[in-house]
Image (cartoon, rainbow, N blue to C red):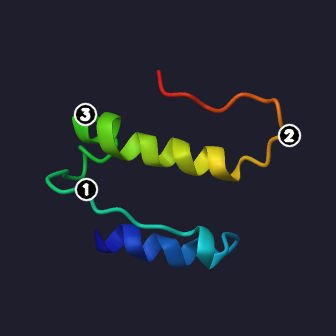
Amino acid sequence: PGQCLAALALCTGLPGDKKAKHLEPGAGHYGIFAGKSWRKNIRPLVLEFFDQNAGRKSGKSKIRAV
């Protein structure tokens, strides 16, 4: 988790109010980006962030999980 938290400091173009952290219980290095934890818990958070910050014009569709 320390590496992920340290990476937030490298995101200098992202305002502090848009930075977030999530520690997924029981997910190891691989499990963060693959497997059930990714599909059920982490990916939806990433997609929600994209949707909230896409800057799309009204009427355009949101990114959806497949």
Q: Residue at the right extreme? A: 57
For badge 1, the amino acid type reads Glu
Quarter-of-image position of residue 37: top left
Query: What secondary structure is marked by label 2?
Result: loop
Q: Residue at x 83, y 37 (%)?
A: 58
Q: Please state if 59 lies on the left or on the right of 12 as rendered.
A: right
Q: Which residue, given by chain and number where applicable, does mark 1 sit on?
A: 24
Q: Which residue, given by chain and number where applicable, does mark 3 sit on?
A: 35
Name the foreground residue: 35 vs 47.
Answer: 47
Q: In the rendered view, tell whether residue 31 sits above or below residue 53.
A: above
Q: Residue at x 25, y 33 (%)?
A: 35
Q: Residue at x 30, y 48 (%)?
A: 32
| Cα separation between marks 2 and 3 | 33 Å
Q: In the rendered view, tell whether residue 59 sits above or below residue 33.
A: above
| Cα separation between marks 3 and 1 | 12 Å
For badge 2, the amino acid type reads Lys
- Labelled pair 2, 1 in contact (Cβ < 8 Å): no
Of the 4 image quadrants, the one containing the N terminus is bottom left
For badge 3, the amino acid type reads Gly
| Cα separation between marks 2 and 1 | 33 Å
Residue density around tag 2, few if under 14, some if 14–19, many if 20 or more, within 10 Å: few
Quarter-of-image position of residue 40: top left
Looking at the rendered structure, which numbered label has been put on residue 13? Answer: none
Q: Which residue, given by chain and number where applicable, does mark 2 sit on?
A: 57
Residue density around tag 3, few if under 14, some if 14–19, many if 20 or more, within 10 Å: few
Query: What secondary structure is marked by label 3?
Result: helix
Q: Please state if 21 lies on the left or on the right of 14 as rendered.
A: left
Q: Which circle's residue, 3 or 1, is located before the other in the chain?
A: 1
Q: Which circle's residue, 2 or 1, is located before the other in the chain?
A: 1
- The nearer-to-camera label among 2 and 1 is 2
